[in-house]
Amino acid sequence: MKTLTFIIFGLAALAQWLVPLAGIMQHELTLAKGTLIKLKCSAPDPYDPLRGRFLAVRPQQREISVPAGAKLQRGMLVYASLTTGTDGLASVTHLSIEPPQSGDFIRLKSSYVHNEKTQIHWPFSRFYINEKLAPEADHWFAENIRSTKGIIAEVRVLNGRAVLADLSFDGKSFREILKQRDNNPSGTAR
C-alpha cells in the first residue's frame, strides 16, 4: 500500500512541473517558429503595483462580421483568419468555429454578437517593460500616441496561438527607441 501511495505522490509532483513547463515550451516555440504579423494598435501605459509596468496593447480591429449561418454566442472561442494587406499590417478577415485548414489564424474569444457583428478579445493585452525604462516610456507615449503612423504590435502566430513579441513605431523596435532616448540626455531620439 505504501508503494502505491509513493507512486501516486510522485505522479502528482511530476504533473505539477510538467503543466507549467508545457505552457512555457508552447510560448517559446511560438516565438521561435511562428509567423510574424503586425497589427496597428493603441498602447497606453498603465501601472499595476503587483505586476509592474506594462503597456496595455489594444489592436484597433475589435469588431468583425459574423459569417452567415454561424451560431456564435458570448464567450465562445472562434478562429480568426488573418490576411496581411499591402501596408504590411494584418487584419481579421473571417471567423469560423473550426480551425482553418491553411493560412495564419488566431484563436480568439467572441464577446457579444449584435447586428451580425461580434466584438473580439485578442489573446494578448499586456506588453511588460523594464522598470528602469518605464518613466521614459511614459514620456515617449505622451509624445507619439496620437501620431498618424501608429504603434504596431509585432505578434508571432503558430497553430492558432499568438504571442506578443515586440512593439514598433515608424519601423523601429520600441525597446531600441527607449534605449536611445535613455542614453540621450536631451530626450530626443537619435
Image (spheres, helix red, strand yellow):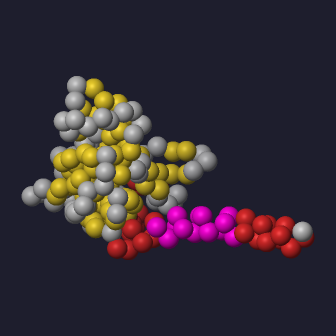
Based on the picture, tell me whether residue 10 belongs to the magenta stretch.
no
At x 21%, y 50%, the residue is 91
At x 38%, y 74%, the residue is 32
Residue extending furthest front? Answer: 1
Residue 12, picture quadrant = bottom right
Q: Main secondary structure of the magenta part?
A: helix
- Above or below, 141 relative to 154: above
Q: Say whether residue 158 is visible.
A: yes
Residue extending furthest right? Answer: 2
Residue extending furthest left? Answer: 86
- Above or below, 66 relative to 166: above
* Viewport quadrant of the N terminus: bottom right
Based on the picture, tell me whether residue 18 belongs to the magenta stretch.
yes
Asked whether, in this view, residue 179 is left or right of residue 70, the answer is right
- Above or below, 41 relative to 31: above
* Viewport quadrant of the C terminus: bottom left
Front residue (pair 123, 105): 105
The picture places residue 107, in percent across and down from the top left corner, at: 35, 52
Q: Say whether residue 178 is visible.
A: no
- The magenta-colored residue range is 14-26
Front residue (pair 87, 13): 13
Front residue (pair 74, 84): 74
The picture places residue 21, in percent across and down from the top left corner, at: 58, 69
Residue 120, picture quadrant = top left
Asked whether, in this view, residue 65 is left or right of residue 86, the answer is right
At x 17%, y 56%, the residue is 83
The picture places residue 179, in percent across and down from the top left corner, at: 39, 66
